[in-house]
Amino acid sequence: MEGAILFLLLIYFAVLLGVSYYTSRKADNQTFFAANKSAPWYLVAFGMVGTSLSGVTFISVPGTVNTAGFTYFQVVLGYFLGYFAVAFILLPLYYRLQLTSIYTYLQGRLGMQSYKTGAFFFIISRTLGATLRLFLVINVLQLYVMEALHVPFWATSLLILIMILLYTYKGGVKTIVWTDTLQTFFMLLALVVCVVFILGDLNLGVGEALAQMTDLGYTNIFNGDPNDKRFFLKQIIGGAFITITMTGLDQEMMQKNISVKNLGDSQKNMMSFSVVMVIVNFLFLLLGGLLYLYAQAHVPDLKGDELFPRIALDYLPTGIGLIFIIGLISALFPSADGAITALTSSFCIDILGMQRDQKSTEEQKMRLRKNVHLAFAGVFLLFVFYFKWLDDKSIINVLLDIAGYTYGPLLGLFAFGILTKRSVVDKLTPVICVIAPLITIGLSYIPAEKMGGYKFGLELLIINGALTFLGLYIFSKKKLD
């Protein structure tokens, strides 16, 4: 089977290279950064599904069903609400200012230090989040495929990143809009095929399967305990703010949205995407329940992140295993291709000031952009090695923890800029944006018994943003004229 998988990988990569060749002809920096503002909204919407789901949803969400039931769907409902805020508050702002990097808004509204701080926190946040997602999928591919071929982990990681570089190096966003669409299709194909096959193998209809899951306590969605970190209000409100920050204030996600020709089409993209995301996330939870029903009959000790890959590759027919691999690969590439491209864009525009540079030629700027692109690929490789060394707990929980600490300052900065007309003491912004996450981390370590049994959850992101907002407000000046 390993030989068939390797052949499949080569075919898949060849298709991506073909798409890259077609989309990157006559590409310049504007093509790389914003697809020349000509990306079709429906392709962006569909491709964003794969980018938002990635390997975390593909592997980790089904694995959480035995311990958390369907409570993750509370977060998904929050996501849905958050997409409205992105579509009708943030996108109009970005289009009105004709931004390429969304953090340029902070420069005009708050000042240069605030602008650089916002871009810096995006770079930290997206680097950690994207490399964590990338590690998850590479690790699964290594354990179940590459080790049988005697390929070491470092070589697998290097090979994957070289592949990503080859098809994103020239075309950037314009290429990714098309490759993400292709990859989303294959990811969803793997999801649907696995759900249908396992239902058939267990001789169950959807209703019967849900009834069995209910008996096992898997289908519980809403948690009514205010002290629990999965309390429904914490999860829904936290999910909404995760969307606002990890989508609306994230250059990777917004870079694709603002590549659409006009605001109306971009809003259509966002709202259609939000509906599809709710449906797809529910299907992943349903798949998780089905996998645990299957495991009870065949391998009852399976759980967590190993559940889906072990069953798909060791217990299901070879054809289903190959489809799983296609889905896994399709979850892998969007975890990194858009992130490396967006990080390159933000670093070049926000940190190096490429758009403000009037002295360098277009050729010099392109050479610089390509060098930055290569550098971020190297950074991704180092972080993947680091996560392999850590070999920590379920990735979905780690990812949400990181989001609470690193996206909070972005939330506070944009909220202050949009909701007030005050001006900040710009030189103090970096200090405020470092102190707020440190206080938030401190709060997360307070034992629950000292807080009457209360456990912090996704609300840490909101607390972090509120602390940033409060710090900016305390040191702000009178209203602008």
Image: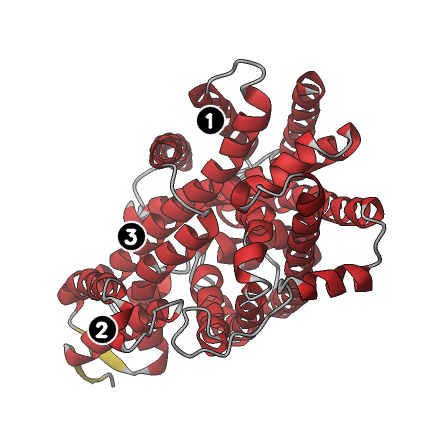
Residue 129 place in picture, x, y as percent: 41, 48
Whether residue 274 sits left or right of residue 404 in the image: it is right
Whether residue 348 sits left or right of residue 440 in the image: it is right
Q: Nearer the viewer, mark 1 or mark 3?
A: 1
Looking at the image, is 404 positioned above or below residue 449?
A: above
Label 3 Cα neighbours within 10 Å, binned few <14 / some 14-19 / many ≥20? some
Residue at (56%, 43%) from the top-left corner?
334
Residue at (26%, 56%) from the top-left corner?
116
- Disc 1: which residue: 157
Instruction: Check disc 3 and report its element: helix, strand or loop.
Output: helix
The kind of residue tagged 3 is: Phe
- Disc 2: which residue: 450
Q: Nearer the viewer, mark 1 or mark 2?
A: 2
Looking at the image, is 269 positioned above or below residue 232?
A: above
Q: Separation of disc 3 and disc 2 at Cα?
A: 35 Å
Q: Nearer the viewer, mark 3 or mark 2?
A: 2
Q: What is the number of the mark on residue 120?
A: 3
Residue at (45%, 65%) from the top-left corner?
242
Q: Separation of disc 1 and disc 2 at Cα?
A: 44 Å
